[in-house]
Image: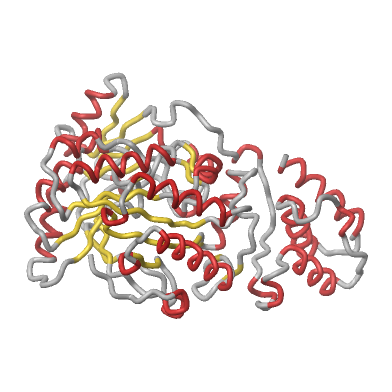
Amino acid sequence: MSLDLFEAVKKKIEEVYPFLKANKKREVVRLVYEILKSGIKPDFLFLPKYKNYEQLKRNLIAVRYPKSFKEYPLNRFYLPELNLKKEDSFIEKSDFLKIKKVVAEKSLKDSKIVSNIIKKYPDVKIDYIENFKSVKKSLEIAGYNKRSQRLYVIKEKFDFLKKCPCTKNCLSCDYFVLNLGFGCPMECEYCFLQGYQNFEGIVLQSNIEDYLKKTIDFFRNIKKPIRVGTGEFTDSLVYDDITEYSVDIIKEFSKHKNIIFEFKTKTLNIDNIFNLPPASNIAFSYSLNPDKIIKNSEHYTASFKERIYAIKKISDYGYSVGFHLDPIICAQGWKDLYRDMINDIFSLISPSKIRWVSLGTFRFKPDTKKVIENRFKENIILDQEMIIDFDGKLRYPYFLRKEAYIHILNLLKSKKMDINKVYLCMEESDMWKNVGLAPILKW
């Protein structure tokens, strides 16, 4: 549908505005395409008859962004060339976790991860290389689409632990990231990795013991609880049956009570964690969205019901649990969708069992928009109004973000959730204040 619409828009713009030069024509094509795709107008009858380009552009932006247009200057609306290619489209596959090739550094031939891969995938060929630096790098959609078919097993030497790279001018939550794993086989349409990852495959690091030692040494003299986790560049547990990272992490960090360790996931690959005694400083958090959004936009992930039942199972076993409403997607009917979601969560899980909740609205670097719309041509997540905001990222306008946070906070309050356990992810301090949250983070 979207490819047909794209071709129809290009043809119509040539017909109605033959006087436009190439660059101006591209902006008009994008605006008209987005107006029609998002359902703001059902046909071409809205097209203005202006021959003055600036007047034409203003009119179209006012149609595409009816609320933001009055609040922001024209340079805040991102209008790159629209160039949709059929061959770049995401195609859903039932065997998305099927690994066709493994590439490992020679020194890791006898490592636990390689041994586990051989046990699980005895027919998969393993190629050995000197080191990962020799792997070809490129930001190609075709390569990214095939990444789950190839695993790289490497030994990390430098990049073990870092403070969460909070966006400039945002209030930091003082989170630390353990850089275990890079790349995710799941297909969330909003994922920033599709505009960031520059190699074809998934990386698994073999030397988990170095990660644990570096982290413990770094926080050896810490006097207050600190929160550390995996899951920035991958899902924390999606390959846990191969890596067994969770086993090593739980065994080690359960001895260090001032380190609150968090696994973030959207999978049901949690069997390993029930083979160990639970520890109060080990937490498992699920990223959650309303069921409709998960079905539309989070391919290959556990369903909404599966996730909340997993949270309950993990909590009942004795681990701490949390959830992340990030990114909040303001799709059509979003208020009702999030209301129903909150009702479903707390019909199963007591708010007293939840250790934290994060809220963050959909945001991404502008260039990622072109990747999303090419890979997921029928997406619903790019149809809302988004502008280039304070940090150079595309975000919902301030008034919509504020409305979303207040709406969800009110829903959480209605369920007796302790609001001191709720924090905003990558937001300005002004937003915290305006939605009634204090940055007093107690893990």
Q: Quadrant of the N terminus?
A: top right
Image quadrant in which you'd find residue 417: bottom left
| Residue with the most extreme top position | 123
Tell me if residue 308 comes above or below residue 69 in the rendering: above
Relative to 31, 231 lies left or right: left
Relative to 320, 310 lies left or right: right
The x, y position of residue 19, in whole percent, is 90, 64
Closest to the observer: 428 or 368? 428
The x, y position of residue 223, in whole percent, is 10, 72
Relative to 60, 319 lies left or right: left
Q: Quadrant of the C terminus?
A: bottom left
Image quadrant in which you'd find residue 82: bottom right
The x, y position of residue 2, in whole percent, is 71, 43
Identified at 87% across, 60% down, the residue is 47
The x, y position of residue 206, in whole percent, is 20, 42
Closest to the observer: 180 or 158? 180
Closest to the observer: 317 or 264? 317
Tell me if residue 282 comes above or below residue 266 in the rendering: below
User: Can I make out residue 169 in this image?
Assistant: no
Identified at 23% across, 59% down, the residue is 228
User: Can I make out residue 119 in this image?
Assistant: yes
State the count of labels: 0
